Image (cartoon, rainbow, N blue to C red):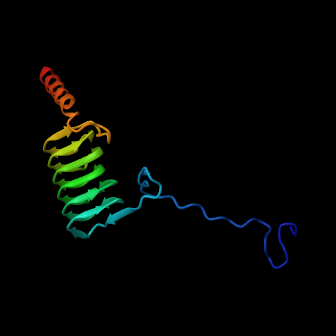
Amino acid sequence: MSIFRREGGQTNEPEARPKPVQRSTPAPAPSSSSQTKTTLVAGGSTVEGKIKGASEVLVEGVVDGEIDLENQLIIGEQGRVHGDVHARSVRISGRLIGNVTALDKVELMPSGSIEGDVVAPRVVIAEGGFCKGKIEMNPPQHKNAKAGSNKEPAAKSGASVASSIGSS
């Protein structure tokens, strides 16, 4: 057995490498920019006042005030927001009391609730999600579009939605 052992009892076996750590929760979805930072309002924390910025914000605690973001707002299951929200996209798993305006999408998850009006080009409400307020789905605004040019098509689409609901 001397071919497997060196002098002093050491073996020729390669050292065992540590296995990568598996995350128990999935990582947040990658955002459009790989250099985007995420701001966390941790559980047990309360922020009073206006939050404004370019970073993504994850709320697991309480925010009492307006949120104005260039990126995504994520309200976790334990998160609470009391105030109006303006962001590129909003995902709600907790509770939001206030109006929401999103440039891309508002997503209400099964554990989420919103009490307020929603304005966004795309709105997703998962089964179990609670919404009390008006939902207005507008087409995305283009920088070179004329002001007021989207009003006529929006009115037509609203009429077609109302007629399809009435015919069901």
In the image, 151 versus 97, the foreground residue is: 151
Q: Residue 148: x and y, percent? A: 20, 36
User: Which residue is pictured at 23% across the width and 37% down the height?
Assistant: 138
Q: Is residue 32 left or right of residue 151?
A: right
Q: Is residue 24 visible?
A: yes
Q: Residue at x 23, y 69 (%)?
A: 47
Q: Position of residue 66 (x, y in %)?
A: 20, 60
The residue nearer to you, when weighing 34 against 112, is: 34
Q: Quadrant of the N terminus?
A: bottom right
| Depicted 46 relative to depicted 19: above or below | below
Q: Can residue 109 be seen in this snapshot?
A: no
Look at the picture and state if 7 lies above or below 4. Answer: below
> Percent position (x, y) of residue 162?
14, 27
Position of residue 154 measured from the top left corner of the image (x, y, whole percent): 20, 31
- Image quadrant of residue 13? bottom right
Residue occupying the point 68% across, 65% down: 16
For the C terminus, the quadrant is top left
Query: Above or below — where is 162 with respect to 22?
Result: above
Observer-nearest of 40 and 138: 138
* Quadrant position of residue 6: bottom right
Residue that lies at the very extreme toward the top in this rendered image: 167
